[in-house]
Amino acid sequence: MKKLKRILASLSLLALTTAFVSCGDNNKVTIKDIEITEAVDSKYVQPNELDFIYNKTNDGEYLYIKRIKSTKEEINIASQYGGYEVRNFQPDYYVVDGEPFINTTTKKIILPDTIEKINGSTLFTYSNLEEIVLPKKLTKIIHFLTSPSLKKIEISSDNEFFKVENNKLIDKENNRLLKVFNLENDSITIDGFKEIGDNAICKTNLTEIIFSDGVEEISGTSIRGNQKLTSITLPSTFKGFVPSYDNSWETALYSNYAIFSTNENLKTIYNYSNVELDLSSRGIEVIKMAK
């Protein structure tokens, strides 16, 4: 909880320092809080259930979602509020009486096709979220959802950057696995990917994860909070762990990566690669395997 409060404090400071930003002499970029009261169609979340940031750039005026205050079972966000298009979904932590607001009722979130970028990390407080519908125009995802109850992700087949296939969300451009969801078995083999992204495998009941040949990079935050996980197999093609694809401030010491520090029962790494690993400080045995 102390770590979470430090994160909240940092986010609050960031919000204050970015309340108004100007670039160049012509004030090309303006970012500020905005209050919207005009009602939208009843099938959508109303503006009083959201907080917004207003953006004015060379590309026009638009909004991003700063905070969701709704506790409806289905949250359907409109493409416009107050006449401004919603292009960014980056909610911060909703705090009540100094503590993060825990949403136990929302099961589905539908994002409008106008949204181009999302940051889903703060939705970890949605403990029963089962489904999310991603925008057709989506071009960037960072910190994807860690919700353990997620069972379904939808995205249009027309999206150029992402796809959903076999219960996996995939970054097509980088051949990166972004999320595995709706897992039923206690063992999984991951193949067909070059990179394994942040938060890709979180809070599951897996006991074993096997990465097949082809996987070259694995984010140090890709596997976290899997309390039953006992072993990971690294393929011969593996070239190394990266601290994070999204967080430049992550520690450079690989033994401190979340993949080794948050999976409490991880005891064995079967290593078919040439990458040398020493995880004795974590009580994890690295077994060198013949190729």
Image (cartoon, grey):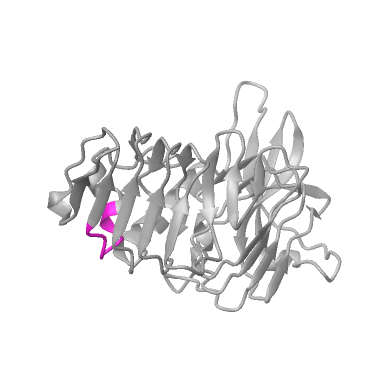
- Residue under the point 35% across and 40% down: 243
Q: Using the image, determine if residue 160 lies above or below residue 52.
A: above
Q: Using the image, determine if residue 279 lies above or below residue 248.
A: below
Q: Is residue 16 visible?
A: yes
- Residue under the point 20% across and 47% down: 287
Secondary structure mainly formed by the magenta segment: loop
Q: Nearer the viewer, residue 128 or 17?
A: 128
- Rendering coords of residue 138 (x, y %): 69, 44
Q: Nearer the viewer, residue 46 or 248?
A: 248
- Judged left or right of residue 204, residue 105 is right
User: Which quadrant would residue 209 be assigned to in this image?
Assistant: bottom left
- Residue under the point 45% across and 58% down: 188
In magenta stretch: residue 62:
no
- Rendering coords of residue 248 (x, y %): 39, 37
Task: Return the residue found at the far front.
Answer: 290
In magenta stretch: residue 263:
yes
- Residue under the point 60% across and 33% down: 173
Question: Could you tell me which quadrant the C terminus lies in?
Answer: top left
- Judged left or right of residue 67, residue 78 is right
User: Which quadrant would residue 247 be assigned to in this image?
Assistant: top left
Q: Nearer the viewer, residue 212 or 115?
A: 212
Please count the marks in the image: 0
Q: Using the image, determine if residue 192 lies above or below residue 227.
A: above
- Rendering coords of residue 7 (x, y %): 38, 55
What span is colored magenta in the figure? Answer: 260-267
Task: Return the residue found at the far top.
Answer: 25
Question: Could you tell me which quadrant the N terminus lies in?
Answer: bottom left
- Rendering coords of residue 155 (x, y %): 71, 52
- Judged left or right of residue 106, residue 257 is left
Q: Is residue 258 visible?
A: no
